[in-house]
Amino acid sequence: MSLPQMPTSRDPKEMRKALLRLRMEMHRQEVRLETAQLLDPIRRLRNMGSSVQHGLDGRRLSFWNLAAVVALGFVTGKGVRGGGLARLLGMSSSLVPLVRALIESRRR
């Protein structure tokens, strides 16, 4: 962004106008920065979705199929009626970082 031009004259009215323009430009930049910070998690989610689609190539597809079948077995199994769903969610949320680390180590 280009900064507003400074007045060539020493007129106080022109100086106040220039100061006001500078303040408005500063405010615009602050709003732009805060908006980018707020939208960053949404961009990460979008990128994660596209990276999952790219990650489903032939070699890893069988792993994902197996994981989906196991997950469906847990969700639709007999233990769900006994409150096992909360336990399953807790266990899966604790295993997510481990699975991510495993996948990342295989990529390298």
Image: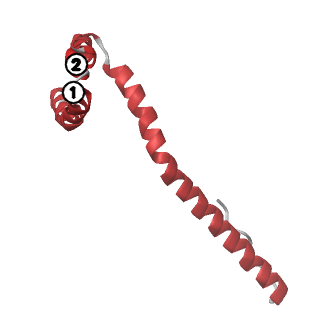
Front residue (pair 10, 104):
104
Q: Quadrant of the C terminus?
A: top left
Name the residue: 25% across, 18% down: 71
Q: Is residue 93 left or right of residue 44?
A: left
Residue at image coords 74%, 76%: 20
The residue closer to the viewer here, 10 or 43, is 43
- Please state the horizontal and vertical placement of residue 85, each as a whole percent of the image: 26, 27
Which class describes the residues within 10 Å of circle 1: few (<14), some (14-19), or many (20+)? some
Figure colour scheme = secondary structure
Q: Residue 77 at what x, y percent from top left?
A: 23, 15
Residue positioned most to the front:
82
Which numbered marker is on residue 74? 2
Residue type, label 2:
Phe
Mark toward the start of the polypeptide (2 vs 1) = 2
Q: Disc number at residue 84?
A: 1
Q: Secondary structure at mark 1?
A: helix
Q: Residue at x 38, y 20 (%)?
A: 53
The residue tagged with tag 2: helix, strand or loop? Answer: helix
